[in-house]
Amino acid sequence: MAYTAGFSVSVGDPTKASDVTTLAANDDYLKAAVDGKAALSGSTNNTVATVTGANALIGEADLTFASNKLTVFGTTGTGTATAGVLNLSTRELTVVDADQLGRIEFQAPAETGSDAVLVAASIYAEADGTFSATVNATDLVLATAHDGAAAERVRITSQGEIGLAGANYGTDGQVLTSAGAGAAAAWEAIPPGTTLSGSTPHTVATVTGANALEGEANLTFDGSVLAVTGAVTMANAAGPTIVNEAATATNPTLIPNKGDDNTGFGWATTDSLTAITGGAERVRIDGAGTLCVGGGAPTRGGLFEIQGANVYQYLDASQHVGIQLDRGSTSYDSGLSFQTAATTNWRLAQMSADNLLQVWDDINEAAVMSFVQGGNVGVGTTSPDHHFESERTGGSADVFAGNFKDTAAAYQIQAHGTTGNVTGTQIASYMESSSPADGDFAGQYVALYKDAGGSKIVAGTLGWYMDDVTAGTIDTRMEFVTYNNNSRTAAFLTNAGVWTDASAAAGKEYFGTRQEVWPDGILASLKTLNVSKYKPANQPEDKPVTETHVSPTAEDFWDALQIGQDPRSEKLNKDGENTNSPVIAAKDLGGVALVAIQELLERVEALESA
């Protein structure tokens, strides 16, 4: 099968006229005729068919032609073996100099006119000698047309030479230069160098005219030092300058603004540097590294010093920090101010008496804390009479928060008595009211915790309440409050010293009647319950017995009746320690006694009625 001009197809042996069938590309019988003459394998669109045998073709997957583009695909992978290759070869058996091995041409044959239809450009490989077993010298030539046939423009030889418009390779030392728009590039010699006047070593050359330099005698560089004889001045009108004259403590030679020549940096003595404004020394750094603000040499031998009529700050030679503010008279204040955006918020100040230092709230114009010589500290008062005293006039009651202790013990609040704790300590809660009413509390301790949302939740309270206020007498009670599933439960120690348990019906959930809980009675369990007299354990043997009690143990009481708290159950804290202590509640002993009495009464009544 062969393709002919005019998009027709010839099928069969072209040497036998009787075996050739020619069909136009749009002939309805094209497919049938081709199917009858040659077999075609492969069905991918745009692949180019190649002969694989007699009347056999195959569509090459790696060679496609579509949209006027011929594409050659390489294999997958890396390296040179995977590239798609377009191979232009000659069948000549004896290649000699000037033979072309392959050529790519660019042409517009559909144009009109003699020049327009000519080859407009080409790239070809040209032998540069007779090929042999040891010779394959080849040049690569680029040819373009301007107003006629394409002519050679650039040649890269087998030895890497670059030729222009033929064998024009230039001469040694020439460079390839542009001749401007509309002109071809050309080889040209480097123009002559510039002239240099002056022969003093290390002088820096400056331009003095066209292709002319001169070594500046006042500007030298020896490889490490740039030396200037004269001033160094920046071009900007307000730029810095270095003045070539002797520096003093008040005469600057390094000037940030050359228009202000009495402000800059100078030199006072050996190993010292001064900062100068308006021709006066303001800051000095001496050879020991001391920074002195105020002018003059440092006098205290430290690291930082501020000098003035009534104020200086210094670090002394032993590195201790010292700040001294001398107000001169009690008629003046002295202190440190703390500001935000030029607004003073706080001051640490000495504002009146010499024995008083205050933390001053400038916004509210009040002293919030005062320190008196001797050690007394006051919050809300400027004349504390105790080691720590807090006062508030008006508003809500005082609230104290934080750690108050004198040891490393794990207490948040600790009161420490006299030396050796001989006399003990006292913590007083003071109620300000001179006319308390029933239900008022004189003092209360509240324990809180924080829930997952950050809110404070009351866990329990201990307080002292006014119970009965009459003329000249006051009865009080102590109240203990705990919470059961967020429900408040309170117990009291009355003014008569009697402990009163919480026992409201709303706080109880009964197991049943006495008969339902103990269908066989309780007396049998009580009969075998070990009740004995005891004294506190772990006492010295020679100590007289001054305290005894009678009761069952918590373990025996639970085993016999399952009343109260299981003494063997575990209540673990966050450290895994069991915090359960075996106990018996007084109300449980009383309740068991009442149940036993009821049971005995029933037996007595049964005997009496028999």
Image (cartoon, grey):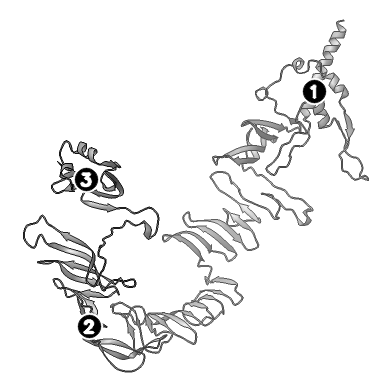
Amino acid on which disc 1 is placed: Val
- CB of mark 3 within 8 Å of CB of mark 2? no
For the N terminus, give its image quadrant: top left
Q: Earlier in the sequence, mark 3 or mark 2?
A: 3
Disc 1 to disc 3, C-alpha distance? 120 Å
Label 3 Cα crowd, 10 Å radius (few <14 / some 14-19 / many 20+): some
The correct choice, above or below, for 247 with respect to 341 in the image is below
According to the image, label 1 marks what residue?
592
- Quadrant assignment, res 104: bottom left
- Picture coordinates of residue 499 (x, y %)? 75, 31
The reply to whether residue 593 is in sight is: yes
Q: Residue at x 23, y 38 (%)?
A: 36
According to the image, label 2 marks what residue?
189
Q: Residue at x 13, y 57 (%)?
A: 108
Foreground residue among 23 and 224 = 23
Tell me the number on the disc at residue 1. 3
